[in-house]
Image: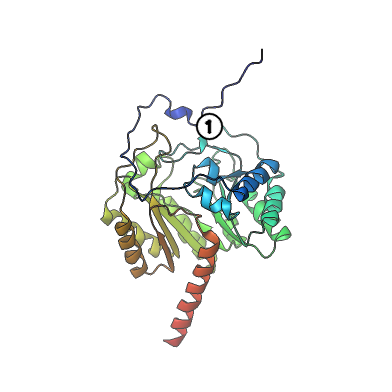
Amino acid sequence: MGITLASPVRHPEKIGKPDNISPRKPDWIRVKAPSSAEAAEVARLMRQKNLHTVCEEAACPNIGECWKQKHATFMILGDICTRACAFCNVRTGKPGQVDQAEPQHLAESVLAMGLRHVVITSVDRDDLPDGGARHFIACVAAVRRLSPGTTIEILTPDFRDKPGAVEQLAEIGPDVFNHNLETVPRLYPTIRPGARYFNSLRLLQRVKEIDPRIFTKSGLMVGLGEETGEVLQVMDDMRAAGVDFLTIGQYLQPTRKHHAVARFVTPDEFTDYQTAARAKGFLLVAASPLTRSSHHADRDFLQLRAARERFLADADLR
């Protein structure tokens, strides 16, 4: 009789914690499971190439929609994160060795899927001397080699205590450099304890200092207990750092061991946030309950580029 091995625990650090009960999801939070033939094809390709996606690992609510359109956000450097954020569904623990074939496999998948725009993100790799920066660079180079017409967006960790990592990545000139602040500074100790708000803000500012042509992007979750005034202050901080594109979406609790949803922000409130952010000077703002950092990234990039062209044209007329 065979022995069935138990699946590894995704969040061992949360096992002994009490359940956190969230309020019932409102009617405006409804999504479909990935059941299309196109989604199945994307899943097969990921398994064939031994790749991971944040769509699956972070339990993204938009996976059905995105995969039906053959869009996916690639998550490099493995599927185990060295951080243990209170909001995130990605597995935590001790990561394995970096897959040196991953850049090639990723680029082959981008080509096979015919992606016009690709988003590459990663787990945190505090165990690596450079936090995984060189691997990001290898992945970008591989995509440019096999699919030169594809624009590239990187969604990076904070590279805390990894001197030179941000500079190395900015110098390769991705089309979009994305790093999410995630929440307001007051909530960092409970929501994002391994990170520091001003370190993340400085990362975004540093990218603009190195190459002002790179679009910078950052995202926030709401519904974690933040106040409206705090969100507006974060917008001001982002604009002071030169951030071009802001995304705001509803936090959804992955498991009962994760931080509870404090409340479900209404669609009208998201519209108010979008209006305020546009008034503050962001080139592009996406704000809705199901907005996620990489959702509609290909379409958004075209809009972002067009918005900059309009801004520059208007500046020339003054």
Q: Is residue 171 left or right of residue 242?
A: right
Answer whether residue 258 is visible to the viewer in this image. yes
- In the image: residue 147, left or right of residue 193: right
Quadrant of the rendered structure where residue 169 is? bottom right
Q: Relative to 230, does residue 35 appear above or below in the rendering?
A: above
Q: Quadrant of residue 102?
A: top right
Identify the secondary structure beneath mark 1. Answer: loop
Q: Name the residue at 62% across, 48% down.
A: 37
The amino acid type found where label 1 is placed reads: Gly
Q: Which residue carries the number 1 mark?
A: 93
At 66% from the left edge and 15% from the top edge, which residue is drawn?
2
Locate residue 14: give its quadrant: top left
Can you give x and y, in whole percent of width and height, for residue 268 in the image?
Answer: 30, 59
Q: Which quarter of the rendering shows the C terminus?
A: bottom left
Comparing 149 with 128, the one in front is: 149
113 w.r.t. 86: above or below: below
Residue 256 pos. (x, y %) = 38, 33
Task: Establish if 259 lies above or below 234.
Answer: above
Q: Residues within 10 Å of mark 1 (few under 14, many from 20)?
A: some
Q: Find residue 193 and report its horizontal and vertical position in percent.
A: 40, 40
Q: Nearer the viewer, residue 153 or 111?
A: 111
**Residue occupying the far front of the picture:** 36
Q: Position of residue 194 (x, y in %)?
A: 44, 40
Residue at (54%, 40%) from the top-left corner?
126
Please identify the quadrant where the N terminus is shown: top right
Residue lying farthest to the bottom in this orientation = 317
At 61% across and 40% down in the image, what residue appears? 78
Residue 164 seen in the figure: no
For residue 162, side relative to residue 246 (left or right): right
Image vertical order of residue 315 relative to residue 291, above or below: below
